[in-house]
Image (spheres, rainbow, N blue to C red):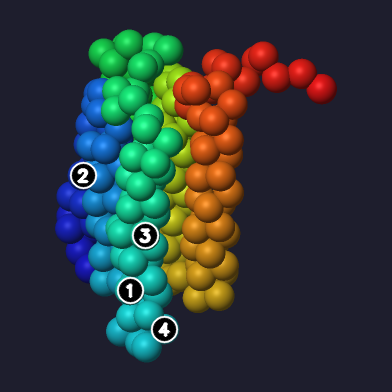
């Protein structure tokens, strides 16, 4: 796969991060992060040799990142009756500006790193840093638990970028283990969201400050 092809799709990942930062609807953000996961699955698949393991891993990533987890999140919003608006602690425009600044910072930091010649023509490392910071920004800037779950999923996508694209291959058992951990985490998070909503009649994390030992 050519470096220009990889860079084009990695820039799309960054644009999706920016889109999520500026989105005020939870369902739209969930669908965007699902699309991001599918793009990463395709990039990882075409960067490897075609084997039975790579095909199985591709299908597993698409199924879990692109369909199962997003459907669980959408179902959680409906069951718990979560307000579809994100209710940001930091405004949407301010969040996008912070995220844009983190992208520039990521590219600056990456230029200072001693990368291999094969990786100097791609933007894998800066996009990894930018996506990781985007996830953290979303977790900090939004109140609702479910939007913070989306932030964690974005951060997991950044780890996937580094592990699959930079090394040129995916350790099969390791990646399957990570995907299963993420899936299990979403089941647990669904239970937590339900309990928070039942106890406080809201799913905002600011209500957690009222918890006492």
Nearest to N terminus: mark 4 or mark 3: 4
Is 204 above or below relative to 178? above
Q: Which residue is identified by label 1?
A: 59
Q: Which mark is residue 212?
A: none
Q: Is residue 39 left or right of residue 95?
A: left
Q: Quadrant of residue 88?
A: top left
Is label 2 in a helix, a strand or a loop?
A: helix
Nearest to N terminus: mark 1 or mark 4: 4
Dot 2 surroundings within 10 Å: few (below 14), some, or many (20 or more)? Answer: some
Q: Which residue is identified by label 4?
A: 53
Is label 4 in a helix, a strand or a loop?
A: helix
Q: Is residue 103 left or right of residue 179?
A: left
Query: Between 136 and 130, which is closer to the camera in this rendering?
Result: 136
Q: Which residue is identified by label 3?
A: 68
Q: Which mark is residue 12?
A: 2
How far apart marks 4 and 2 lie (CA) works out to 26 Å
How far apart marks 2 and 1 lie (CA) works out to 21 Å
Please tell me which residue is depicted at 70% across the width and 19% down the height of the picture.
211
The count of marks equals: 4
Is label 3 in a helix, a strand or a loop?
A: helix
Q: Quadrant of residue 161?
A: bottom left
């Amino acid at each position: 796969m050519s470096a220009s092809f990889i860079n084009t799709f990695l820039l799309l990942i960054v644009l999706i991060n920016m889109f999520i930062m500026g989105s005020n609807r939870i369902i739209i953000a969930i669908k965007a992060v699902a699309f991001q996961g599918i793009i990463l699955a395709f990039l990882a698949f075409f960067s490897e040799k075609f084997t039975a393991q790579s095909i199985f891993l591709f299908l597993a990533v698409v199924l879990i990142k692109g369909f199962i987890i997003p459907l669980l999140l959408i179902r959680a919003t409906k069951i718990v009756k979560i307000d579809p608006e994100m209710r940001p602690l930091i405004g949407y425009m301010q969040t996008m500006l912070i995220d844009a600044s983190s992208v520039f910072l990521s590219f600056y930091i990456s230029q200072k790193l001693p990368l291999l010649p094969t990786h100097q023509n791609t933007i894998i490392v800066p996009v990894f840093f930018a996506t990781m910071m985007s996830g953290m920004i979303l977790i900090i800037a939004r109140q609702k638990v479910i939007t913070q779950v989306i932030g964690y999923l974005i951060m997991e996508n950044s780890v996937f970028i580094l592990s699959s694209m930079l090394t040129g291959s995916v350790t099969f058992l390791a990646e399957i283990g990570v995907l299963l951990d993420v899936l299990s985490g979403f089941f647990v998070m669904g239970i937590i969201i339900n309990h928070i909503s039942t106890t406080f009649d809201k799913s905002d994390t600011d209500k957690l400050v009222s918890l006492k030992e």
